[in-house]
Image: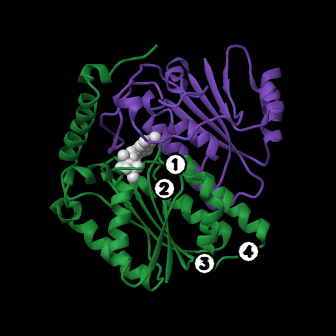
Chain colours: A purple, B green
Amino acid sequence: MRLIIHDLSEEYEKKLKVNNDMVLGNDGTIKSCIGCFDCWTKHPVLCCLKDKYSDNPKNMQYMDEYVIITECYCGSYSPFIKNILDRSISYMLPFFVIRNDEMHHPERYSNKFKLTVYAYGNSLTEREKATMKSFVKANAINLNCDDYTTTFFQSPQDIISLWEGVKCK
Amino acid sequence: MQIAILDGTPKFKESRSGYLINHMENLLGGNNECHQLKLIRKSQWQQYYKTIDESEVILLVAPLYVDGLPSHVLDFMYHYEKYLKDEGKTPNLVMYTIINCGFYEGIQNKIAIEIVNNWCNKIGITKGGGIGIGAGTLLATDKPIPFTAASRKTLKEELQKFKELIEVKGTKDDLYLNPQMSRSKCMRLSDMYWYFCGFANRLTPKKLYVKRQ
Ligand SMILES: Cc1cc2nc3c(=O)[nH]c(=O)nc-3n(C[C@H](O)[C@H](O)[C@H](O)COP(=O)(O)O)c2cc1C
């Protein structure tokens, strides 16, 4: 299963889903992570904030590709996308392992997946792009992904055009 | 000089950012007027913009979340930029940053500090410098006087230097600090921290490993 999280408008969202993809977008109702760690130490893999994003860490166990479509803001994911990522840390365990000669978290689930990031923005600087790339790489190491890619686009429409092209093949 | 201290943790008590802010405010407070702005309080943002307008320095103190800044901090940055555009303002500010993380290596905060640096470039303010602190979560286990612990000697010294830099609105390269303890000890203490939190919630260690379906 492909899990797609995106910050595009509803009109684009309709075009994203193929077959059994799971798609999660911004309907303006997401609550902001409060950093309580209850999803690790009180009711593991369940965010204490109740909304339609609470189950994302649980759903991640079924994916073989994690697609993130985001505006690139100063080299970061957009606030909405970042919020989903912040609220999904319990996909991993809270404990520690050494990976890449750095401290990271061990896996809770056994699925392996690829991280694919489509980042858009019409006047991104080279520095912002470099930061975004490092960011995705760091996430991929943290999540122990099989593989990862970061691709930049001028606009959401460019992503949708690519998407539809791939879908038609 | 007026300093706007942006508090980037969403927590209201026992945060490591809170420790660091209190420490910096104690150092800076004598000669300066510090205003703490808790960014998770979105309803206050309009007021915060005005406080920043009147300040000469911004000091952001935040935790590392998933290799970057917490989402509400990004959201604030996004909206502050919009406010500047709408008002046609170009602020004359110097920005300093302190990010703390759970992992041992201070360098893991590099991306978050780079994002802040990119933001400074975007809105046209001066970047003064940043400090990335490894094993920040363990600051609290050094209670009651975290900065006097041997493992934090360098941190304490660097925060003193940072204070001096801020007071002259100087600039420096970003700095990344590990605690003065071995990584294996840090991992043991950090693992224990989670078991301890689990126990406090009546969860046995085994329950922390549950695979919710
Ligand atoms: C949602 C979330 C994501 C986190 N991601 C990371 C991370 O990627 N790397 C890391 O070293 N620590 C991470 N941490 C740990 C925090 O940075 C650490 O606990 C810090 O000390 C919290 O500071 P505070 O008490 O000021 O909020 C994360 C914590 C939370 C709640």
Mark 3 nearby-residue class (10 Å; few <14, some 14–19, many ≥20): some
Residue type at the position of mark 3: Glu
* Kind of residue at disc 2: Gly
Callout 1: SS: loop
Residue position marked by numbered label 2 in the rendering: B8
Compared to residue B134, the image places residue A8 above or below, namely above
**First in residue order: circle 4 vs circle 3:** 3
Quarter of the image that includes the C terminus of chain A: top right
Q: Residue under circle 4? A: B89
Q: CA distance from mark 3 to mark 2?
A: 20 Å
| Residue at image location 30% in from the left, 36% down from the top | A97
Earlier-in-chain disc, 3 versus 2 = 2
The quadrant where residue A89 appears: top left
Tell whether label 2 touches label 1 (CB within 8 Å).
yes
Please report whichever mark, 4 or 1, sits nearer to the chain's N-terminal start.
1
Residue annotated with mark 3: B54
> Same chain, marks 4 and 3?
yes
Q: Which one is nearer the viewer's eye here, B11 or B61?
A: B11
Chain of the residue where label 4 is placed in the rendered structure: B
For the residue with label 2, is its CB less than 8 Å from the closest atom of ligand 1? Answer: yes
Mark toward the start of the polypeptide (1 vs 2)? 2
**As drawn, which residue projects farthest toward the left?**
B150
Residue named by callout 1: B70
User: Does residue B103 appear left or right of residue B44 in this picture?
Assistant: left
Mark 4 against mark 3, which lies toward the viewer?
3
Residue pictured at 72% horizontal, 68% vertical: B84
Q: Report if the beta carbon of the residue with label 1 is closer than 8 angstroms to ligand 1.
A: yes
